[in-house]
Image (tube, grey):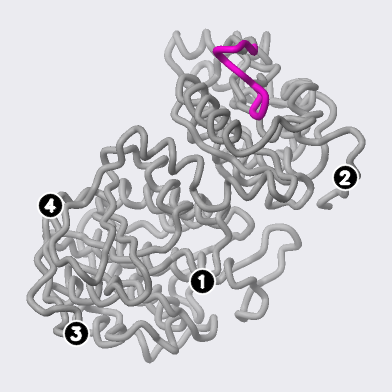
Amino acid sequence: MLFSTEIDIPRPSFLGGGSWLVTNLKDITVIVGKNGSGKSLMLRAWRDKNPDEVHYIVPERTGELDFNPQYMIDEQSGHSRRGQSVRNFNPDYRRRILSRLQTFFMKRGNVREGIAPGSPADIEEMLQILLPDFEVSLVGAANPPYKIKRQGDQTDIHQVDQLSSGEIQLITIGLDALTIASMWEIEPPTSRVLLIDEPDAHIHPDLQARFADFIVRIMERYNLQVVIATHSMSLLTALTQFSGPNKTATVFLTRQKASYSAEVPSEVTREIAACLGGHVLMGPLFGSPLLLVEGDDDYRIWGQVPRHHVVSIAVIPCGGSDEVKRYQAKLEQIFGSLSEPHEHPIGFALLDGDKQIPTPSSNNPQRHVRFIGLACRESENLYLTDEVLSALGHTWETACTAIEGLRDRLSDEKSSALCHVIQDRKNSDIKGLIEIISQELDTRKIPWTVRVSSVIGKNRPSGSLAQYLGSSLVDALWPPTAEVISAD
C-alpha cells in the first residue's frame, strides 16, 4: 500500500484560505482541536481529494438499525458514498452502513477465481473484540444480511432503543470501518486511508480504550492508514499504548496555523498522558483506586472489569514492569505535590508473580501508589483457574485432557512446555501457549482476555481465581467490608 507521509488539503477562506499542509503522518494520526478549529472540514477535504481511496466516517451518526436495500447502489463506490457524507450529519447513517453489508457480499460474489478476499469471518472476529457482549453474524443472502444478539440473555437486536448510545455507536462505527476495509481487500486501491471523525462521542473512557485496541488491530489486519479527529485524551493515550509510540502522531489543530508536523509522543509526554489521560485521575476523587498494569493483555483484562459494575478501578496501561515502576514514581510525585498521604493507598502498581516487589523506602516511596503482585506467574495463568474454566464448560480434568491432546500436534519444545502446564498450571510459563490453549478450550473462540475479565468482574473473586490473584490484590480492589452485589 502507498503510505502517505504528508498531505496538502484546501483550507476554507473563513479559516484563512490557501491549504493545510500536514507532514510526518504515521500509521495513526490523531487530530486534536477545539470546536471550530476545522477538524471535520479538514477530514472531508482530505476525502474529497480521492474518495475511492479515502473513506470518511461522519461524527453525527443517526438513523434506525434496519436494512434498506435501496442504499446498496450508493455504497458501491467512493464517489457515491461521498455524496452521502458531505456534511457532519447523515440522518440514515445506520441504515446505509447495514445496507453496505449486502454490497460487500455482492462484490465478494464477483470474484471468479481462487478464494475470495475480504472474509466475513474476519469481520465477525474483529467485531467480537470490539463488542464482546454481542454476537454479530453475517448471513449473506438474506434480508437483513446480519444478526445481532446480546450474549447475556441471547436477545435478538432489531432496534436502536434496545442498545445504549455507546453500544450503537461502537456497532455502527465498527461495521462502517470493517465493511470498507473488506471491500478494499476485494478491489484493492493504491492507498487505504480511513478518516474517523469524533468516534469518542457517547463512549465511556473504558470503551474508548477498547475502540483504540480495535482500531490498531484493523489497521494491521487490513493495511490501513488511519486519521482520527477527537477531543478525548483518553482515546489518544490508548491509541498510543496499543500501537506503540512510533506509529501514532498528533496534530494540535488551531485556526491560526496552516502547516503542521504531526508530533510523535516523547517519553515524558507519554508518562504525563498516561497519568492525565482524561478519566484516570478522576478515580481517586470518586473512591476508585488506580491500577497500573504491565502490558496490553493486562490492560485488556483489567480495563473491562469495571464494566460489570461490581468493582470500580481506573486502569493505567504500561509497557512492562520497568515502565510500571516509572509511572508509579511519576504518580507518587504528582500526588505528593497535590495532597497529604491517605489512610489507604489511592492506587496500586500490579506486577506479575515472577517479578520482585520493590520495598518502600525514601528513594522509592509508596505513600499513594503501592506495589502489589499476582500470586500466579502472570495474567495468562488466570485463564486456567477453576472459575474461568467453568465459564468455558470445563473442569481442570477435562481441560488437561484437551491440552494433552494438543501435544502430538506441536513441536517438541511446545509439547514439553504443555507438560509443565499440566503439572503446574499456576506457575508455568504459558505466555507462548495461551492462544493455542484458548483456541482448544473455547468453542466460541472468544479472546482469552475477555473470558478472564468477565469472570473477574462479576463477583469478588473466590476459589482458585482468588488464590491466583492473591489475597493482597483481592482485598485491595474488593475490600472485605465493602458490600458487593453480584452482576448476575
Q: Is residue 107 visible?
A: yes
**First in residue order: circle 3 vs circle 4:** 4
Q: Is residue 294 magenta?
A: no
**Disc 4: which residue:** 5
Q: Which residues are magenta?
A: 360-370
**First in residue order: circle 3 vs circle 1:** 3
Q: Nearer the viewer, mark 3 or mark 4?
A: 3
Residue 340 percent location from the top left of the image: 69, 33
Do callouts 2 and 3 mark residues in contact (Cβ within 8 Å)?
Answer: no
Quarter of the rendering containing residue 121: bottom left
Tag 3: residue type? Phe
Tag 2: residue type? Val
Q: Nearer the viewer, mark 3 or mark 1?
A: 3
Tag 4: residue type? Thr
Do callouts 4 and 1 mark residues in contact (Cβ within 8 Å)?
Answer: no
**Disc 1: which residue:** 146
